[in-house]
Structures are given as C-alpha cells and as structure tokens.
Amino acid sequence: MTATTGTSTEPATRVEGLDKVTGTAKYAFEYTAPAVAYAWVVQATVATGRVTAVAAEAVLGRDGVIAVISHQNAPAIAATDSAFSDLLRGPEVSYRGQCVALVVAETSEAAREAAARLPITYDEGRHDVLFTPAHRSLYKPEGDGTDTSQGDADAAFDASAIQVDAVYRTPPLHNHAMEPHASLAQWDGDSLTVHDSNQGGNSVRKALATAFGIDESAVRVVSNHVGGGFGSKGTPRPAVMLAAMAARHVQRPVKLALTRQQMVDLTGYRSPTIQHLRLGADADGRLRSISHDSISQTSTAEEFVEQCGAVSQVMYAAADRRTSQRVVRLDVAVPSWARAPGECPGMFALETAMDELAVTSGLDPIELRVRNEPSGDPQEHVPFSSRHLVECMRRGADVFGWDRRSPTPRTRQEGRWLVGAGVAASTYPTNILPSSARVAVDADGVFTIAVNATDIGTGARTALLSIAATALGVPTSVVRILIGDTDLPKAPIAGGSAGTTSWGWAVVKAARELLATLESEHGGQVPADGLEVTASTHADIKAQRDLSRHAFGAQFAEAWVDVDTGEVRVPRMVGVFAAGRIANAVTARSQLLGGMTWGLSMALHEQSIQDLKFGDFANRDLATYHMSANADVCDIEVEWLQEDDPEIGAAGTKGIGEIGIVGTAAAIGNAVYNATGVRLRETPMTLDRIIGQL
Ligand code: MOS
C-alpha cells in the first residue's frame, strides 16, 4: 500500500465539458416538441385537510389556459413502488405545498399566472409538524435492517470505566440540485416518451409504466444531461409523473419545471435527526459497548427512514452493541435521500462521540480509532473485502500536520481567533447493483459503449470511458459512449454511490467478451459489419462472496473561532480516502471535494426551518437557505490510497459520490472543540450556539 495522489489511468476532463460550457449540452427542459403546452403546479396552502372545491372556471379558457387538472378530473394512475399517493389521487392534503392541481397553458408564464389565481377551498385540519423525541406517534418502521443488537449494550455500558452518553441533532437539509426537476412528456397513442431530469431512467420508466398501466417497452426516458440530484432525483419524483398526466389529459406534449421554491416541498429533503449515542470503554479506550438510538421524521403520505445507525454497525469493535431507529409521522413533506442518507448525520453523531471519548480517555483521537479497529465486520461477523481506515488516518495526519496540534483545547490563539484541529472517520457502503452494457466495434476499430447510465454531473461518462478503454486496451480517443436513454441496455441508478461500480462491471465484462470473441472467432480481425456483445452482471453479483464491502476515509479540519463573536471559519481541510480503484483522477477529485464542501456547508450553515404555524419550510430559496459560498470554502486537499480489491467487481471501484460528505461535519465540530473547549452536538455550528460558551 502506498499513498499517492491520483495515479489512475489517463486522468481526463469531462468528455461533455465543451458542450456544457458552450451551452449546447441539452437538459430536460431544453428539449421541445410541436404544439407543446406548459404545466404549472398549484400547491396546497394548508398543511392538512381536504380540497373542497377547485374553481377551474375562474381561469379556464382565458389567457391561453388549456386545462385545470385536479383530483376531480386527473387521469387515473395506479400506485407504484415510488408511491405518488399524494399526487392528484384524492382530495386529501397531507402536507403544505403538496400538488393539489395543475394548470396547463400555452406558455409557462400563462400557466404560472393562472395557477396563482386559481381559487381552491379547503376543509382545513389541525396539523402537527413538531419533531420531538417525546412524540406520541413515534414508531418502529417496518422492514429489516433498522434495528440490530448483540450482547447487552446497556449492561456493558454500565460496567465501563469510561462513558460517553450524549444526544446529537441535525436539522432538515435540502438537496437543492442546481438544475430544478423538469420534464417534457409526449404521448403517441399508448406510448410515452419523456425527457426528464433524474438519476436513473429505468426506475422512472418502471414507475410511469406501472402508473399508466402500460408495458415498460412503451415508455422511453431520455436523461442526457442532469444538473445534480444528490438523491433528490434518485427515485421518480412528482414532476415527471405530473407532466405525463398533464400530457395525457390535454393530448399534447407538456413541459413542466419546478421552481426552486416548489422543490423545497416536492422533491424530498434530509429528515432532521435526534441521535442518542452511548459509548462505554475500558480505561485504555477499548470500546466494550456502542449504542446508537436514532429518531427521524417521516410524512403521512409516504414512509422514509433516515437510518443513522448503519455507521455504528461497521465502524468499531465492541462485543456489546445496539442500533435502533424510530420515526415520527408528521404532516410534513415527504423526506427522502440526500447525499449519504443515514451515514451523513449518523457519522456526525458517532464521530463527535468518538472525539468526546478521546478527550475523556486522554487518548489521541487517531490512536483511539486505531485501538478500536475491528478484525472483521463487527456486526455481520464476515471479513471486510478491504478496509484501510487506519492507513487513511495515518496518511491524513502526515498531510495535515496533525503532530502540530495541541491536544489541550483552547491553547492556540492568533489575534482574536482561537485555533484548533479535529479529525473524523468516513465510511460508505460499496453498493453494487445488477447492470447490463453493450460494447461494439466497427471495421475502423472504433468502439462504442452503450449503457443506460446517468451522468448527474459526476463525470460518469468520462469515468466509464476510462474503464472501457482500460478493459479494451485502447486509447479513449477510439471509444464512444452512449448513456442516458432507456433504449440502451438496462442499468441501475446513479445513487448509493453505486453507479460507476455497477455500470463499470458490466462494461468491463462486455469488453472482455468482445475481445475474446474477436480473438476466438475472427482471429483478432474486426468483421466488415462490425461486432457487438451485450453482457449482464446479474449472475456475477449473485455469486459474490459473503463479505462486508465499504469505502473508508479520514477527514481533518482546522477551525478558527472568533473569541468575541463565536464565528467559525475553516481555512483548511484534508480528506484521504480508500475507495478501491479510482477510475478517473480528475472527476474523482471533484466528487470528493464536492462532498467535503457540502460537509463543510452542513457543519457551518445549512438548515431548513419547519414553520410550526404554516407547516411547511420557512426558508425556501438560496437566499434564505444558507450554504457555504466561495469565501467560506478555502483550502481543501483530497487524496486517496491505491486500493486493489478483487471482491468488488471488475471495475474495481467502491464509489465516491457520498463518502466525501461523511464525517466532515464531525471533523469540523471536533476542531471547534479543540480550538475553544466548546462541544457542539448540533449542526449548523452558528455563532449563537458558541458565543455564550466562550
Ligand atoms: Mo445518493 S443520496 O443515493 O443519490
């Protein structure tokens, strides 16, 4: 194992980069169709209750308004895996901001104007949007994997010489992808084509086919370029379903784009969490007991569980352990995936608690983690396919200059700034999903890769090109790539950090089979009409050994805290990751840097505020939803270790989309503690939470 920076094959800038910077790369809303109409979402102005009347006649037939669609006249759609129970299927309102009607007009402006004027009356109920651990509706979600227990975590905690017992909180957080959710839907008889902004066309196709009772082969989803998603486009969301419903209703192509304000209610968000951590250790810092009991909020329309405890199942050795997850069902918008759902808030709690344990036991935080390194998966009792957390910690310590940190809080001051350093671990599971891919070669020796992957801005196209070229043993200049269309071989979503690993495996498999066929049947000579091979990894994934597969990393942060105001600045961060093979150094660095930047933003700025009176979120745009801007994001160094893991598929990658955000906020909070002696157990770490304690 050697630590190096970016030595993968052919580091390359995005193949679609020129198209993007010159504005020729087309996003969903930029496609058009003859006689296209525009739909606008009308949102509920009450948080719970029933729609009693929609006065469509007030706007219909005027100013280019073509139709008003509500539960009274909407095309019937069947329930799908992705629910949509709240989408014009009945008069019930389950959260403020829910779509209760669509206005369709000749122009987007006319639709928007009419939507604002459309009179809707409600029978308003009493809403409850207060997320509290004492809530009477707290319940254990269905489905497995949420609760785990081994030994007796409470008894072992009670018997421990050193104890950390604390509660950590994270607020609701919104994904806010740069490109709002948008769709163009076109029906041709019972065939449907949509251009849609999503993280995976195949799941959108399945949802549309199910909803409208048509065969999947009658639905085509094109998602050529996507401007971010971070989980908010990971499952089919309302925009595409509403566009298809509207197009069906008016018998014309329909375009629908959400505004940023509408996205706050309609595209998901990270649930707030309250997490109770109890760590019990012997005097030498070795953990005997870990318990991680979490609660999060969900909606009455659909269940979503932010599973914070998952990280405590894999990180550290301890004979006695427990994780539990409870949810509170409130009259709120439907929460969903946001980058590293579960792991991100979970690691804020666990890695802050580990720092508290380091302080209590008088150990260096890195040494504490080394002492608690498990020999295999401590919950599942199977080996790790590879785990280089300690190596990431050691390398990060060197790069960061950890040895210059004073272990005693509040010992370094530069003018009015208290200065400190903190560390936290990162982890994210290596998810691998079945995929298929086609590789073709023509008589000129040009290869074409075809796979319905989605590039949501990550550089997936470019990474797949590198993977394909390596497998084929040719330069990328003779390889073409086709993605983002359900007409291409079926592939899983760009989510769960599983995209490149899953698609890449199928691409490598198809490439190897093509080369083998070329050699065995054609003597290495491409036939005049070319040759192509389609491969699938379904069987390969089923045949995988029972191992624990995860990426690991170490995050270091330096914090400066204003001694008078409590303002926190983070001038420097270092992240070192072990995530298998890095397919493309340029885009990988950008992914990890982006994850760490969001972690910084979570630590210092981001929070969505649930309005108890009205029931929806109070901060609904990028002016009021504060996030780290250029002046906040200073020096961030990203490195990775070369990690060869033969147990994670032929692409050899572990996924890097999410691990970058995991642990960052804890590293920053731990640095704030080191700088000030003030322990923050809640994000964001705004000055009001610090100033009184300085
Ligand atoms: Mo990621 S939150 O699974 O898109």
Image (cartoon, rainbow, N blue to C red):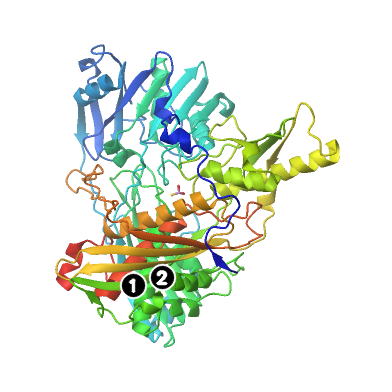
Mark sitting on residue 421:
1
Q: Amino acid at mark 1?
A: Ala
- Sequence-earlier tag: 2 or 1: 2
At numbered mark 1, what does the secondary structure look like: helix, strand or loop?
strand
Q: Quadrant of residue 419?
A: bottom left
Please give left or right for residue 133 compared with residue 17 in the image: left
Q: Are marks 2 and 1 in contact (CB under 8 Å)?
A: yes
> Where does the image place residue 124, in percent across and percent down from the top left?
20, 36
Residue under the point 36% across and 78% down: 404
Q: Nearer the viewer, residue 268 or 224?
A: 224
- In the displayed structure, would residue 534 be above or below residue 248? below
Q: Is residue 609 above or below residue 22?
A: below
Decide if residue 398 is in sight here. yes
| Residue type for callout 2 | Phe
Cα–Cα span, label 2 and label 1: 9 Å
Quadrant where the N terminus sits is bottom right
Number of residues whose C-alpha sits closer than 10 Å to that of mark 1, classed few (under 14), some (14–19) or many (20 or more): many
Quadrant (top left/top right/bottom left/bottom right) for the C terminus: bottom left
Which residue is at a point 23% across and 12% down the rendered structure image?
A: 62
Q: Which residue is situated farthest in the top direction here?
A: 61
> Residue 459 at what x, y percent from top left?
50, 44
Coordinates of residue 384 in the picture (x, y in percent):
59, 66
In-front residue for pair 304/16: 16
Total marks shown come to: 2
Q: Residue 407, relative to residue 527: is it above or below? A: below
Residue with the mark numbered 2: 400
Can residue 140 be seen here? The reply is no
Res 382 → quadrant: bottom right
The one nearer the camera, 456 or 638, is 638
Judge the density around disc 2: few (<14), some (14-19), many (≥20) Cα neighbours within 10 Å. Answer: many
